[in-house]
Every structure is written in C-alpha cells, then in structure tokens.
Amino acid sequence: MLKAQVCVIDFGSQYSQLLVRKTRELGFSCEITSPSSFSLDKSAHKAVILSGGPDSVLKISREEKDLYFNILDELKEEKIPTLGVCFGFQLLSLYYGGVVEKGIFGEYGQTRVFKEKSEVAYTWPESFDVWMSHFDHVVKIPKGTKSILKTAGGVIAALKFDDANILALQFHPEVHHTAHGSEILLSFYEEVAQIKKDWSISNLQETILNDLPDLEGKKVLCAFSGGIDSFVAAALLSKKLSKDDLYCIYINNGLMRPQDERHIEELKRESNLNIEIIDASDRFLNGLEGVFDPEKKRKIIGKLFIDCFEERSNEIEKEKNINFHYLLQGTLYPDVIESHSPHSSGGKSSTIKSHHNVGGLPEKMKLKLLEPLRFLFKDEVRLLGENLGLHHHWIYRHPFPGPGLAVRILGSINREDLEIARLADEVLFSELKNHNLYQMTWQALAVLLPIHSVGVKGDERVYEKVICIRAVSSVDGMTADATDFPSSFLKAVSSRMTAEIKGIVRVVYDLSSKPPATIEWE
Ligand code: XMP
C-alpha cells in the first residue's frame, strides 16, 4: 500500500491539491483527505498540514468545531508536527487559545511580509511577497507562540509555537505568487517536522508494481485512448504482464484528428503493447446525426463507446476462449479526490459537462478495477512515463477530450464539417511546430463555429464559416488563461486556414479565461 508521511487535511481551499504536489516535488510522500475521513496512521504519518478553506473559523457549526478540535486533540497528543495554512492557521490559533476576529477588509492577492526581530532560525529573507486570501485574522496570539512574520499593516502572517512542533502561516506557501514558498515548506519539513525525503519517481514505480494484486495467469483489458493516462498505465502493467495478457482496445469513434490517428498507429507499431484498433466511425457518426445539444452528444458518445467496447471484449473472450479478470483504467488522483471529498468542487458543484472517459464500464462489465495511477497527478504520470523509457513526444502531447471533435464542431455534426475541423487542426499544429510554440501552450484547439460570415475570395463575394482558435496556459485544466501568442503566429494560422480550407473565410482568437469560459466550447 502506498503510504504517505505527510497528510494534508483539506478544508476546501482551491489550493489544497497544490500543497500535495509541492510537497511531493520537494521529495516527501504526501496524501490528502477531508476532515471527516481523516484517520491518523501512526505508522505512516509524520506531519500534517491543515489547509486553507472558504469557511470562517468564527462561523463553523458546533459539529464541525468538535470534529476539527478532536483532530487537533489527537495531533497534540501524538505530537504530530503540524503546519496550518490560512484557515488552518486560524484554527490552530483558536484551538490554542488565541483570538481570531473578522477583519473590516479582507486581504487578497500579493502582500509583503516582514520578519519580526531576528530570532527565527529559518533562512527566510527579511521581507518577501506572499499570497493572501483571507478575511479573518488573529488579533491575539496563543500563549507559547511567537509572531514571526507581519504585514506592513501589522497583521500577523506567521506563528511559531515555542514548544510544540507547529508552524502556522496566514498566507499560502503553495501558490507560485508566494516568493520562497518552497523554501518555507521545506523549513517546515526539515526544521520543524525533521522528516526525511522519501518520494522519487523510481521508488514510486516499484511501490506501485509491488502493490498490484497477483496477476499470474490473469487477463487484463484496457480501454486505450492513446492519451497519456491509459498509455502510461498500460506501459506500467506491461512490466508485469506478457503482451498476450494485456489487451488494449482502441475505439476509433470517427471524431479523432489526423494527428491522433497517426499517434495511435505509431504506438501500435512501436510501443510493445498489444493494441487493437476498432473502426466504429460510422456507428458514432450515424448516432450523432441531427443532434445539436452538447450534453446529448456527450451522452450518445459515452454510451456507444461502452457498447462497442463491451461487444468487442465479449468477442475476444469467445475467439480466444479466455475470461478477462481486470479492467485497467488510467484514473488519476484528482479524480479520486473529487469523488471522495465533500469539500471538493466535484462534491458540491453541479455538472458542467459530463466528461466522457470510460465511466460506466466497470459496473456494466462486472470486472475488477486496476487503477495503478490513482495516487498520481498528471505531471507525475509524465515523469513515470519518462522513467518507463517512453518517448518524450508520446507523453508530452496536449490533452485531447474523449468526445474528440464532436465538442469542437458546435451543433450537429456532418462529415463535411468534420473534414474542415480536421484540416484546421492540421494547420494549427503544423504552424505551432513551425513557430516552435507547441510547448508554450498547455492545450491548443480549433473550433468550427456554426455561423457564416461575408468575405471576398478572388473577385467574388463569399459567405462562409468561421474557425476559432483557442489556446490556454494552465497547470491542470481546472483554471486557464488564454496563451499570449505572437501575432505573427496567429496571422500565419489565419492566412493558411482561409487559403487552404474550403469553406472558411474568417479566423478568430478566443481570449477568455477559465472560469468563466471552459476550455472546450461544448
Ligand atoms: P473543459 O472544457 O471542461 O476542459 O474546461 C478541461 C480539460 O478537459 C478536457 N475535456 C475532456 N477530457 N473527456 C476527456 O477525457 C471529456 O469528455 C472531456 N471534456 C473536456 C479538455 O480538453 C481540457 O483539457
């Protein structure tokens, strides 16, 4: 079992997962849990972080206060080194007898903090910028603590506890707007908690492989999309299974881009995996005919995917006279957190889009699940892929959604529009490569808009369609900003698209950030 020496208790901050990622980046194993599911693992946990959160410690319910204080009782009793961040800072202050008050003004964004006196041993600079996002503040510090950082306005920004191994920060060391954030976290791990680094990708690969159930004589089925998650999951499993025991089924839904088709052919040829490509394009395109509503399109694609996958796997079982035991999925840690944490956006928010991957398959097929990447973030999956010796260009591709071009052709889909969307993608990516900009953006896409616009081609008036280019900078796709491309690149894309793609007269660039706009248009 993957054991983590640091446990983040998530009080609902949008940055809680970043605390885990930063901690692992610094070399310490780390997991995240909600307050209600936290259970101190005395053999593993050597430090705990209390995250930020949207609630005010002055307004939490009686039950919440009891739950949180019980956790702090246990941490105190067991002398577990604890770091409080923002809400966690105020909770610790309150618990240890300090006074927290609601401020007249909240403090949001970058704030300068100054070291108090010179008694602090940490090697932090005398003053630096930090990221604050809070309303309440501590007006009286608990007995036995020292204020070690303050803002210019006198707000206490960090507390050190004299006897206990506790550090509490009003600001967020995990966000990149906090200068020296990593050093501050490292001070906590090395000086306060005094724990040793234990997290590296090669250790991780071994731990994951050791954690797998006994696969001797077992057959594993993989819904293979060619995306990084299912690919790395399959490549990892291939360390334990022979080529014949791991079946990767790739369903071509006819909504892929030419670059995806080339990619999957290359993986089939060169990756050492047993990949079967099923061409189900007609079935998907017929099923989508005349359907305008984005959610309906997604649901139809999801259902057809499950049908095709199930049919083919039944056929394989008959043809080869075998039984599949496991379904391999590339589930990642954010999906696991979203589905468990009552604080996460997944728990509270309404469905924005029903993401299609392989949802529904395990229940329908009554197979046991193998999810070897369920503790990892995307960037760690890429490192694992590198560690497995997979080619760089296989694992550093931009993400591409399961429903493919169906969510990039707005409204109903026909073969003519599909061809336009494919050509637009080819132009966009060949120019990204020509201008050496592929890695400058996290994801780039071309969307075919359902409008016509007037233009002149040759000497003739035309009334043709519009392509919208979207490209975003992001870390995990949860939030995103439009990428600042040079105008020379955008103009090159526009002039090639209008010249080379029949039916396109205009190209526009999407400047919206997420939120409010999502990355895909549907
Ligand atoms: P949105 O549009 O929700 O997209 O801002 C965030 C990221 O998710 C991708 N995406 C999907 N990926 N199945 C997937 O595997 C889907 O149904 C799906 N919908 C969106 C999108 O491309 C972006 O990277």
Image (spheres, grey):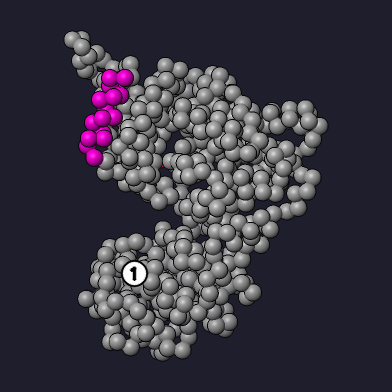
* Relative to 520, residue 448 above or below: above
Rendered location of residue 58, percent (x, y): 39, 72
In this rendering, does residue 340 appear at all? no
Q: What residue type is labelled 1?
A: His
Rendered location of residue 193, percent (x, y): 49, 79
Rendered location of residue 9, percent (x, y): 51, 67
* Relative to 346, residue 453 above or below: above
* Relative to 334, residue 25 above or below: below
**What secondary structure is marked by label 1?**
loop
Front in this rendered view, residue 347 or 215: 215
Give the magenta-colored segment's residue range.
486-500
Residue position for label 1: 180
Rendered location of residue 324, percent (x, y): 75, 39
At 58% from the left and 53% from the top, the residue drawn is 374
Front in this rendered view, residue 396 or 193: 396
Q: In which quarter of the image is ligand 1?
A: top left
In this rendering, does residue 474 appear at all? yes
